[in-house]
Amino acid sequence: MLDYLKNQTPHLNFDLIDGILTISILRPKAKNALNSEMYTQLAQAFIDADEATDIHVIILRGNETDFTAGNDMSYFLSLAQTQATTLDEDIFPPFHFLKALAQCSKPIIAAIRGCTIGVGVTLLFHCDLVFAEDNAIFQLPFVNLGLSVEGATSLFMTPQAGYH
């Protein structure tokens, strides 16, 4: 059994049943916003799952109400106040997560309900299949801020949005 399956975290739950790894984001007070620790754990889970012979498919989901509100903005604010402006894509947790997700060869299914914002939308373009409930809301706040979206979303959105 993989180490992260034995050590459940406060905001992520990992269940492996019959070759299906279900990763649940469980941070309801923050609408499942992702912080540094969560990005690091998710990246490692995708890397480990890709190498594991007993995992055949990965399901990524939120809790009962939301998928994810995207980045935990307090994490980014503290990062801006404490670190240099140069970010190494191999160690900066959000980039490391997106890279691990994009490079994972196992089928990845996203199960969406409620809010799906920012990186929550970005990560969907690196999944093989996306199931969205009727109450799913998708938002890319980058556009309103005059910023480019991350994770190749601008490249993937047009050809993949309907496909997924």
Image (cartoon, rainbow, N blue to C red):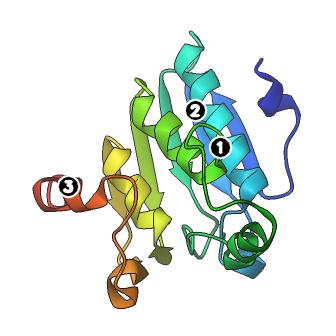
Three-letter amino acid code at disc 2? Phe
The number of numbered discs placed on residues in the rendered structure image is 3
At label 3, counting other C-alpha atoms closer than 10 Å, the crowd grade (few under 14, some 14-19, many 20 or more) is few
Q: Nearer the viewer, mark 2 or mark 3?
A: 3
Q: Which residue is mark 2?
A: 46
Which residue of the protein is positioned furthest toward the left in this rendering? Answer: 159
Q: Which residue is mark 3?
A: 155
Looking at the image, tell me whether mark 2 or mark 3 is earlier in sequence order.
2
Gap in angstroms between the C-alphas marked 1 and 2: 6 Å
Q: Which residue is mark 1?
A: 42
Question: Looking at the figure, which quarter contains the N terminus?
Answer: top right
Q: Secondary structure at mark 3?
A: helix
Which of these two is toward me, 50 or 112? 50
Which of these two is toward me, 98 or 92? 92
Which of these two is toward me, 89 or 100? 89
**Picture residue at 74% right of the left edge, 56% below the top:** 36
At label 1, counting other C-alpha atoms closer than 10 Å, the crowd grade (few under 14, some 14-19, many 20 or more) is many
Establish if 74 lies above or below 15. below
Check whether the beta carbons of the residues at disc 1 and disc 2 lie within 8 A of each other.
Answer: yes
Gap in angstroms between the C-alphas marked 2 and 3: 23 Å
Looking at the image, tell me whether mark 3 or mark 1 is earlier in sequence order.
1
Three-letter amino acid code at disc 1? Leu
The part of the image, by quadrant, that contains residue 23 is: top right
Gap in angstroms between the C-alphas marked 3 and 1: 23 Å
Q: Secondary structure at mark 1?
A: helix
